[in-house]
Amino acid sequence: MSTLSSIASIGVGATVGATCRYYIGTISSQYFGKDFPYGTLISNVLGSFIAGVLIVLVLEKFLLNETYRLMLLVGLAGSLTTMSALSIESIQMLSDGQYSQALLNILSNLLLSLLAASLGVLTAKHVFNLA
């Protein structure tokens, strides 16, 4: 796969992932309010689940060729999840004196994302009878 093809594959996935993250943030603030960054949490958990599924498909089942691996894992899951937003939102909470909210934000993103990635791996292994 050429460098240009790799860049294009990642770019397509990243465009979809970033767009999904934007709309998840917009919709979640409409439904849940703006007191807590639910959009980032949902995006990180969903992206981690998708990454867990894709890791199994790529590493154990070998169902995806290089183009799709880059597009989905690096581009889509990489841009759907967002460490930068988590960091900025947590720093804002800390500077506003919302220490418990910041801690809840950090821990919930970390723990739920790890759990989601694990569930993604287990789900993919179960679906493809790899367990």
Image (spheres, grey):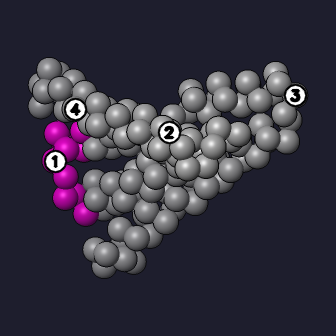
Q: CA distance from mark 3 to mark 1?
A: 48 Å
Residue 49 position within the rendered picture, expressed as x and y whole percent measured from the top left: 45, 56
Q: Pointer 4: residues within 10 angstroms few (<14), some, or many (20+)?
A: some
Residue 89 position within the rendered picture, expressed as x and y whole percent measured from the top left: 66, 29
Residue type at mark 4: give it: Val
| Residue behind mark 4 | 12
Residue type at mark 1: give it: Asn
Name which residue lies at 62% across and 33% down.
86
Name which residue lies at 70% across and 39% down.
35
Callout 3–callout 2 Cβ contact below 8 Å? no
Residue type at mark 2: give it: Gly
Which one is earlier in the sequence, the residue at label 3 or at label 4? Answer: 4
| Residue behind mark 1 | 65
Which one is earlier in the sequence, the residue at label 1 or at label 4? Answer: 4
Q: Is residue 45 visible?
A: yes
Element carrying mark 4:
helix
User: In the rendered image of this protein, does residue 69 appear above or below residue 114?
Assistant: above
Which span of residues is magenta-colored?
61-71
Name which residue lies at 35% across and 68% down.
124
Which one is earlier in the sequence, the residue at label 2 or at label 1? Answer: 2
Element carrying mark 3:
loop
Depth-wise, is mark 4 or mark 2 nearer the camera?
2
User: In the rendered image of this protein, does residue 100 appear above or below residue 93?
Assistant: below
Q: CA distance from mark 4 to mark 2?
A: 20 Å
Callout 4–callout 2 Cβ contact below 8 Å? no
